Amino acid sequence: MTIIEFLTPWEFSPALVVFVVGLGAFYYLGMCATDNANKTAKYYWQATGFYIGLASIYLVSHSYLDYLSQYMFWVHRFQHLVLHHFAPLLIILGGVEIIRKSLPRWLVNWPALPAVIRLPFELPYRLIQHPVIAPVVFVGLIYLWLIPDIHFAAMLSQKLYYLMNWSMLIDGLLFWWLILGPDWKGEEQGFSVRIIMMLVVVVPQQLLGAYLTLSSSVIYDVYDVCGRAWPISPMADQIYGGIVTWIPASMMSVLGLVLVLRRRLNHQKRMENEIS
Amino acid sequence: MKLVKQSLIPLLCLVLFACADKQPTRLTDVTGLIPDLEFELTDENNKKVTAENYLGSTVAIFFGFTSCPEVCPTTMHQLSSILSKIGESAKSVNVLFISVDPERDSAENLKKYTAVFGASFIGLRGDEAVIKEMTKRYRVTFGYGEKNQQGDYEVSHSGAVFIFDTEGKARLLATQSSSAEDIEIDLKNLIDASN
């Protein structure tokens, strides 16, 4: 397989191209604005992280990997690992401060807008970002799309397949924004809530991964109905998929936990330095 | 009150007719969900055929290969016995066995293979790329394993049977977990409905 064959989209999705190119361009403008404001600004790590995250979304959704994700359970689990954990985490960590500089003025001055415009967006946002609801939605979506009947329909219908992947990506961005976004600089308030949220999402993911890995029967028959990308026993496919759900996914959540702790410690150090 | 009754009766009739028009199926009803039957392939007699050649008969398609050890022969035997149970009216059914292994499945091999199951069974083949396009339309796929020393290899493929009506519209999806009884009942209803 050549690189061109690998990169050719299995099913062309204009929405995805607009999303990836648009976000990438905004970030570039943000970098230019940062340079203009401060010639010595250093953001290599942020930019690298952001673009790796963005590129990984493109690769799992718009290349040969997308084809494999539709016809191999474990590749599908890998695709969701990227869309829900890996890419949003990197994008939030690397993107936020930079991209804010290229946002249109009305968006930067959002609180100044009249309530009629703000509330229809803010109320659902506040609801989904509520510290109790956000982790439930985060884990709930993983469970929802893995209910055998729903999984079957999502793999057989292109519309549902897109809905599944977009919902994972958007929820991933919202959740990691809540945990590691710039609204929280590491202060005491909000620290324990974030720690608890991270702990709450780790355990159900591990249980699900263990269930898939250790199950003695084939749970998802859609891959037998539609055929697999290459010959592999259904049990092996399911076990690999279970392991991807179990270990790297919960590792990513543990990584989130470590990042929250680190930010808290850095904040404390800064405060001590200011006092002394 | 009279007015209510007068308007209710036609409404009720409408609902009943709507129900009668579309019977609930035991298999997955894929009407409108899966694209119509469409292809350009060669048949087991090396004749070029398109979907239009099979319009007018109820068509079942299956993507398999002749050296398939388990799924294909089981499915074909099951369909064959279902067709003979349905009897006379099943004579108009065509089962198209579309090879996903064109390298090993020559027209001759296909002909020998389908002859075992009866006259309704027809083998079709085409280039790998053509078959890939066709499987993509129905959101299924196939793939090959590594060749062993004898040159043999495994093939992964779909276990689904797609059933189309006499106009080439997709109607039913049978899977490996569908029971023979369900396939028989739904297939018979479909044949009867188009007669």
Image (cartoon, coloured by chain):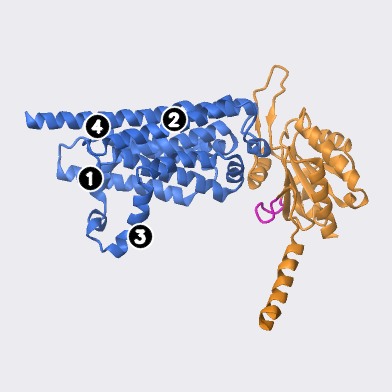
Chain colours: A blue, B orange
Where residue A205 sits: x, y (%)?
47, 32
Dot 2 crowding, Cα within 10 Å, few <14, some 14–19, many 20+: some
Q: What stretch is highlighted in magenta?
A: B29-38
Labels 1 and 2: the sequence-earlier one: 1
Residue appearing at x 47%, y 51% in the figure: A14
Q: How much space separates mark 4 and mark 3, taking CA atoms?
A: 32 Å
Q: Which amino acid does label 1 sit on?
A: Cys
Tags 1 and 3 touching, CB below 8 Å: no
Residue A32, disc: 1
Asked if the residue at tag 2 contacts the one at tag 1, i.e. Cβ–Cβ closer than 8 Å, the answer is: no
**Residue position marked by numbered label 4 in the rendering:** A263
Q: Which secondary structure type mostly characterizes the magenta part of the structure? A: loop
The answer to whether one can see residue A1 in this image is: no
**Disc 4, disc 3: CB below 8 Å?**
no
Say whether mark 3 and mark 2 are on the same chain.
Answer: yes
The residue drawn where x is 32% and y is 33% is A195
Measured in 3D between alpha carbons, the distance from the residue under mark 4 to the one under mark 1, in whole angstroms, is 27 Å
Labels 2 & 3 near each other (Cβ < 8 A): no
Image quarter for residue B145? Answer: top right
Residue at mark 3: A120
Q: Do labels 4 and 3 share a chain?
A: yes
Label 1 vs label 3, nearer the camera: 3
Q: Is residue B37 magenta?
A: yes
